[in-house]
């Protein structure tokens, strides 16, 4: 029996969300807003919070500052059932903060990376990874390719730890030219439709997923209003979306990942994994904050029964 189901290492910060902002005030002036709220953010952290809420034994490795935000993050992890023993406190650097100003048509951000600016794949604790059934990775770029390659090879050599990799937006515009070197070391590649189309130079998400699955064990694509799809061994599975009223789309993709992986680790059929991913992604957008409306296991199953008319 492994100590944990899931090991996650990556970004964690505070999201300060300010809704209802159509125009930022000019310098030297002041404006008032009806609401301003604080949440835990960061793709890796939101995934960990989700799997924790769904009952998986999850441990998170990252760093926060020795400040009130760091304390807030630690308490949130504990409340969601996430093991925080690998969360490092850095007294000389502040916790990362991202301020989101959201209007009816668009939003903008002010971000202080804080301790997230010191993230290094070389700091992944491989001895701790061995104690988990699965590890989830985010933050891949071409700049840190060699570090990812080294870590993934080490995990593959363990023989009993599976890996999921969530692609993100490639700010360089090159779209991961060396990703094919990593794919044979990845059990599940997760991406949204835009990332899939750019990375695999195709016009349809299914075609991109097929290309990815030629090397990766399983390719999963989040297709927004059309739901999601997955390809394994040349076979395609799809799942319809769940219509909801969206309040805040922050963390929807990470919430999908948490729902999908939690089902996959429970050996559910691929169709059921997609459905649970879609449900978690849908529920997550119904409230401000990337994890506020994320369900526990009972809430997820209840939502699925109602959404499928059973």
Image (cartoon, rainbow, N blue to C red):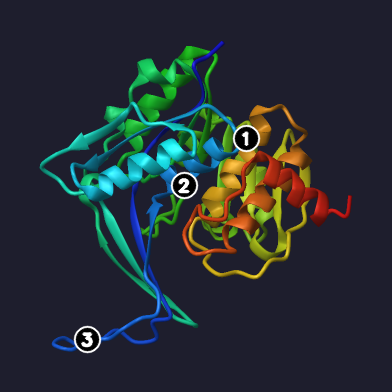
Instruction: Classify mark 2: helix, strand or loop.
Output: helix
Q: Pointer 2: what residue? A: 46
Marker disc for residue 30: 3
Horizontal side of residue 227 vs 291, given as left or right: right
- The answer to whether any part of residue 125 appears in the image is yes
Left or right placement of residue 189 versus residue 275 in this view: left
Label 2 crowding class (10 Å Cα cut-off): few <14, some 14-19, many 20+?
many
Q: What element carries label 1?
A: helix
Lower position in the chain sequence, tag 1 or tag 2? 2
Q: Quadrant of the N terminus?
A: top right
The mark nearer the N terminus, 3 or 1, is: 3
Taking the image as shown, residue 65 lies to the left or right of residue 162, namely left
Q: For the residues marked 1 and 2, what is the alpha-carbon distance in whole angstroms? A: 14 Å
Residue shown at the point (38%, 19%) measured from the top left: 128
Q: Nearer the viewer, residue 78 or 125?
A: 78
In the rendered image, residue 163, in percent from the top left (x then y), is placed at 52, 29
Instruction: Locate residue 288, reporting x and y percent.
Output: 49, 64
- Residue 262 is labelled as 1
Residue at image position (49%, 82%) is 105
Outermost right residue: 310
Mark 3 in CB contact with mark 1 (< 8 angstroms): no
């Amino acid at each position: 029996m492994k100590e944990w189901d899931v090991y996650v290492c990556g970004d964690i910060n505070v999201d300060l969300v300010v809704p209802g902002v159509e125009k930022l005030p000019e310098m030297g002036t002041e404006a008032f807003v009806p609401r301003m709220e604080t949440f835990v953010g960061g793709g890796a952290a939101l995934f960990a919070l989700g799997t924790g809420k769904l009952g998986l034994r999850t441990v998170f490795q990252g760093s926060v500052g020795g400040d009130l935000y760091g304390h807030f993050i630690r308490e949130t992890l504990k409340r969601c059932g996430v093991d925080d023993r690998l969360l490092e406190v850095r007294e000389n650097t502040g916790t990362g903060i991202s301020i989101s100003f959201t209007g009816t048509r668009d939003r903008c951000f002010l971000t202080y990376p804080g301790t997230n600016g010191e993230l290094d794949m070389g700091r992944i604790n491989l001895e701790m990874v061995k104690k988990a059934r699965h590890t989830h990775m985010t933050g891949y770029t071409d700049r840190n390719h060699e570090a990812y390659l080294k870590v993934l090879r080490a995990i593959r050599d363990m023989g009993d730890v599976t890996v999921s990799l969530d692609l993100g937006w490639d700010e360089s515009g090159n779209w991961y030219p060396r990703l094919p070197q990593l794919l044979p070391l990845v059990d599940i590649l997760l991406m949204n439709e835009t990332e899939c189309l750019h990375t695999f130079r195709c016009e349809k998400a299914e075609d991109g997923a097929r290309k990815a699955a030629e090397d990766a064990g399983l390719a999963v694509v989040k297709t927004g209003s059309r739901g999601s799809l997955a390809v394994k061994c040349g076979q395609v599975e799809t799942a319809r979306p769940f219509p909801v009223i969206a309040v805040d789309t922050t963390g929807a993709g990470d919430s999908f990942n948490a729902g999908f992986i939690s089902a996959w680790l429970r050996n559910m059929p691929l169709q059921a994994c997609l459905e649970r991913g879609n449900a978690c992604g849908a529920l997550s957008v119904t409230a401000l904050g990337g994890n506020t409306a994320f369900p526990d296991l009972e809430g997820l199953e209840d939502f699925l029964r109602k959404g499928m008319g059973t």
